[in-house]
Every structure is written in structure tokens, then in C-alpha cells.
Amino acid sequence: ATSTFSFAPPPSLKELSVTSGPTAGGTPVTITGANFATPLFCNFEVSGEVSVAVRADSVFSEDSAVCSTPQLVAGTAIVKIGSNTAEFIDSGATFQVYDVPSVKSLSHNSGIHGSSTAVIVYGDNFVPSSLGDAICAIKNSSGDVISQASASEVTADAISCDLACPASTI
């Protein structure tokens, strides 16, 4: 009996559809490039220490595939691809992994109808790059947004907003 071993052109990564996601993982990332074959593996390496390889959820064609991010530590992940779990091609593509922000408390929990109130939202992991444009919002008991404002300042543990309290009853 004989066994065969074949060589294929290395896959290359051109672009990621999404460039950030939470540490919990599960973010589907469409990868475009060339020479994709089944199986295709995506490797996410954070800070040169944590490296997790996942099999592509699907390979649509020779130049498009989807990998869901694994659970990772916060930081910048280098994304590599390969046709096995031992050899990966470094494309230089990066994926920013962030801790999910959480709210702990508010500086004020009420305001005067028809006026504006400066509110500070206290919590953890408020990082401007992971939040994009942070927005504070007031919702009524049905969950409908009745007032919102862009944050004037964002730090790791606080977001400042100037919220207008509508003249109508909430």
C-alpha cells in the first residue's frame, strides 16, 4: 500500500470583515483572501502568549470563509490562517479583543422634566476603542429610548453624559 502527500499553495488572508469582539468569543469573522481549502483553520494569537486555533465554520469559496472567534484574553490578536493546526501563515491582520463593559451605578437616578442633567455612569471596562461612540440613553418602562446623548468623556470606569429629561412623563 502506498500513501500520498500533496502540496497546495499556501492560503493568504487579505481582509477581515470584523476587527474587534469580546473576550467571550463567538464573533463571526468573514475572511477574504486566496487559496482557501477545506479544512481551513484560523489562529488568534494574543500578545504572543495565548494562541487558539479554530476550524473555519464554513469555507464558501477559494477566497472567502467564516471563522468564529474563540474565547480569548483582552488585547490585540494576530490572525493567522492555515490548512492544518500546525502551520499558519501570518498575514499581519489584527483583531482587537476587549472585556465587555458593565454598568455598576449612576451618579443620579432622576432629573427634572424639561431640563438637562449631567449623569456619570460608573462601571468597568469602558474603553473608548471598544465602545466606539459611547451613548447614554434613558428608557421608559417599556424599554423605548426617550432621550439619548453622546458621551462627553469616557474613562476605564466612567462615562459622562448630559442627558435631556423630556417634558412628558416617563
Image (cartoon, rainbow, N blue to C red):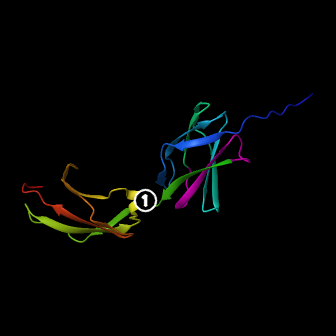
The residue drawn where x is 83% and y is 34% is 5
Q: How many marks?
A: 1
- Asked whether, in this view, residue 94 is left or right of residue 81, the answer is left
| Above or below, 61 relative to 87 | above
Q: Position of residue 68 (x, y in %)?
A: 54, 44
The quadrant holding residue 162 is bottom left
Where does the C terminus fall, quadrant-wise?
Answer: bottom left
Question: Which residue is the site of mark 1?
Answer: 100
Q: Position of residue 76 (x, y in %)?
A: 54, 59
Where does the N terminus fall, quadrant-wise?
Answer: top right
Q: Secondary structure at mark 1?
A: loop
The residue drawn where x is 41% and y is 59% is 129
| Above or below, 8 relative to 133 | above
The quadrant holding residue 134 is bottom left
Please report the bounds of the magenta region as a residue range.
70-88
The residue drawn where x is 16% and y is 67% is 117
